[in-house]
Image (spheres, rainbow, N blue to C red):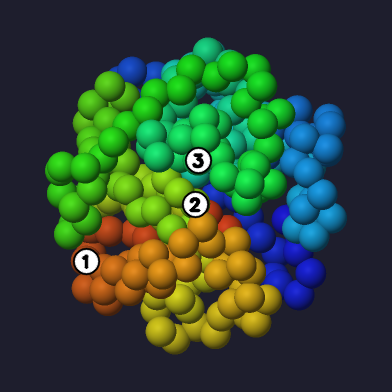
Amino acid sequence: MRAYGVPPIVCHVLLVETDNGLALVDTGYGTHDCDDHTRVGPTRHLFKPAFDHGETALRQVERLGFTRDDVRHIVITHFDMDHIGGISDFPDAQIHVTAAEVLGAVREPSFREKMRFRPAQWAHGPKLVEHNPDGEKWRGFAAAKELDAIAPGIVLVSLPGHTRGHACIAVDAGHRWVLHCGDAFYHPGTIDGQSKVPGPIKVIEPLLAFDRKKVADNHARLTELYRRQEPDLLMVCAHDAELFEHAKATA
């Protein structure tokens, strides 16, 4: 995406090979969004997504030699259009998400949530698997749940604020954990205390927040985790291109 006033924005998707097939963490925009731009609504004029079929998760999975049927599970950080657009490209996959997010996006959305989410992206009737991560702990986060139905080492960490049921996804890559923070923060400067956060991001992040106080609390918690500099943990967010390139370089 090439939004006005900010550097190029990626939609960071993880592909995980497990003994139970492939799993995706988020999906970015999908091929149906590329075919019909109206699916993502008028904000496309602000965020200016590329709508390139070659960048979709499906086409990238196929370039690796797999098929759409090999993707059996998708774990979603939240239901914003740039995170779930690709779920319709994998109609047989189970979609794992917090129950709070399904409530706010699908079942009982508030007026503001109705304006935010795009039902056309789930009109195909995906297989939603709802989770309530409310008991286990992961690195100090009390509300977490290991998704054993997918594979050991994939953990759904509840972190509401950006949306009603937003979550971060932790994946054990063997030599380290990768924490996909979704939109819990937008820019590394938010948690590292060094990089300068662009002005438009400072405006957009609270503007899009479902609960601004929780977003601020999440920033504090993620900053604390980042400052511990645990050698077996890589923290990435969904949209920062520099973090994305760093993640690829150190894979």
**Residue under circle 2?**
163
Residue 136 vs 243, above or below: the answer is above
Along the viewing direction, whichever of 142 and 169 lies nearer the viewer:
142
Q: Earlier in the sequence, mark 2 or mark 1?
A: 2
Q: State the separation of the CA atoms marked 3 and 2.
A: 8 Å
Q: Which numbered marker is on residue 230?
A: 1
Amino acid on which disc 3 is placed: Gly
Secondary structure at numbered mark 3: helix
Q: Is residue 64 left or right of residue 134?
A: right
Picture residue at 65% right of the left edge, 42% below the top: 114
Amino acid on which disc 1 is placed: Glu
Residue 30, by quadrant, is top right
Q: Which numbered marker is on residue 104?
A: 3
Q: Earlier in the sequence, mark 1 or mark 3?
A: 3
- Whether tag 3 and tag 2 are in contact, CB under 8 A, the answer is yes
Along the viewing direction, whichever of 227 and 121 lies nearer the viewer:
121
Residue 104 vs 178, above or below: the answer is above
Image quadrant holding the N terminus, namely bottom right
Secondary structure at numbered mark 2: loop
Q: Earlier in the sequence, mark 3 or mark 2?
A: 3
**Mark 1 burial class by Cα count in 10 Å: few <14, some 14-19, many 20+:** few
Residue 64 % position (x, y): 56, 29
Closer to the eye: label 3 or 2 = 3
Picture residue at 31% right of the left edge, 41% below the top: 156
Residue 217, by quadrant, is bottom left
Q: Is residue 154 left or right of residue 182?
A: left
- Whether tag 1 and tag 3 are in contact, CB under 8 A, the answer is no
Closer to the eye: label 2 or 1 = 2
